[in-house]
Image (cartoon, grey):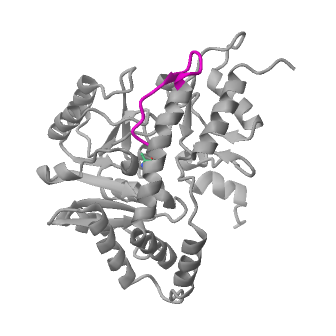
Amino acid sequence: MTRPTLTSLLGSRVRPDVRAMHAYAVQSSAGMLKLDAMENPHRLSPTLQQALGERLGAVALNRYPGARLQDLRQALAAHAGIPEGFDLLLGNGSDEIISLLSMACAVPGATVLAPEPGFVMYAVSAALQGVRFVGVPLRTDLELDEAAMLAAIAEHQPTLLYLAYPNNPTANLWDDAVIERLIEAAPGFVVIDEAYQPFAGRSYLDRLARHEHVLLMRTMSKFGLAGVRIGYLVGRSAAIREFDKVRPPYNISVLNAECALFALEHAEVFAAQARDIVAQRAVLSAGLQALPGVEVFRSDANMVLVRLPRLDGETADVASTVFQRLKARGVLVKNMAGFHPLLANCLRLTVGTADENQRLLTALKDSLCPAPT
Ligand SMILES: *Cc1c(COP(=O)(O)O)cnc(C)c1O
């Protein structure tokens, strides 16, 4: 027998759907003003860097993660204020929790349903588990289309219904009364994804005890620790116990856990940063509104979605043109062209510091009407 070549192995033994996929593209950002990924613009202060360094240096790296994860679960439960009878599952970011939910619920015929445009990982992780994904378009004002959602729920009987609260990339919180009616109609689990809770002003947490089938997902990424990779799912203890079985036993690094515990001990620093970002969001939105022809959508998160006016003589999606011009000026944002028809000519801008937002506004103004050269 001749051994198959690597090329033929890749062609015959790797799943065809995996071969047809594109890898998740992380844009290169070296030397750029990075406003593309809803990261917190603030780093730890030198004092906190020093203190964290000492803490991390003392961690037993020779041991697998153990009891410290219990401390982290308790600290997160206290931080979030989770009710009696509820428990918490830890993920390597919310991304991993979304994968674990798809995996745990991948029975034949299962469907994952979410409004679109929405967070891409709901569809990606469903596909990777062989679970069907159904996206239901939002209305043109980017609110939930209640009738379409109810019809899709009745038709597809989704195992998992994701509602991002606020949504990414539209940045808005949807109508609570509509959400409540969707939850009541849902025959499976409903996951309320509160990644942007630090900036939102409202949370589903106080309503969580009303329904047994609702799960709440949060992350430390938008809180200010995107590099640390800690997400968590809150649900009834019986549900969390079940989902926890598919979690790899050592998915949370001892370093990640220690960083998260450290950050929670200094939660007031991050809360102050979130308040500043919310204030800067208003300044940025007003500055964007003052640009001729730019449509600014309401934001309850640390990003602002804008629709750009058509440029003279341009036929392509204007977002792609302006994205490139911003990039040439050293500003990296997210180009939503081609992402969903509802987002034609749209850019998603992460809210930065006052100074960063000013640089973004100047670069955007120049990009919309570049000076003749
Ligand atoms: C950023 C984001 C997350 C967080 O993902 P992590 O893996 O925790 O970084 C989850 N849901 C939505 C809607 C997001 O935008």
The main secondary structure of the magenta stretch is loop
Residue 158 lies in quadrant = top left
Judge whether residue 323 can be spotted in this image. no
User: Is 290 or 339 nearer to us in this picture?
Assistant: 290
Q: Residue at x 40, y 72 (%)?
A: 265
Above or below 138: residue 223: below
Instruction: Please check the rendered image and state whether residue 291 is part of the magenta-colored stretch, yes or no.
Output: yes
Residue farthest to the left, as pictured: 210
Please identify the quadrant where the C terminus is shown. Answer: top right
Please identify the quadrant where the N terminus is shown. Answer: bottom right
Residue farthest to the top, as pictured: 313
Tell me if 65 is positioned left or right of 243 in this view.
right
User: Is 146 or 22 nearer to us in this picture?
Assistant: 146
User: Is 14 or 246 nearer to us in this picture?
Assistant: 246
Q: Residue at x 51, y 65 (%)?
A: 228
Q: Position of residue 162 (x, y in %)?
A: 32, 43
Q: Residue at x 49, y 63 (%)?
A: 229
Magenta region: 289-302
Judge whether residue 83 can be spotted in this image. yes
Q: Position of residue 22 (x, y in %)?
A: 61, 44
Above or below 156: residue 366: above
Tell me if 224 is positioned left or right of 197 in this view.
right
Q: Position of residue 43 (x, y in %)?
A: 58, 61
Q: Position of residue 82 (x, y in %)?
A: 22, 62
Instruction: Please check the rendered image and state whether residue 312 is part of the magenta-colored stretch, yes or no.
Output: no
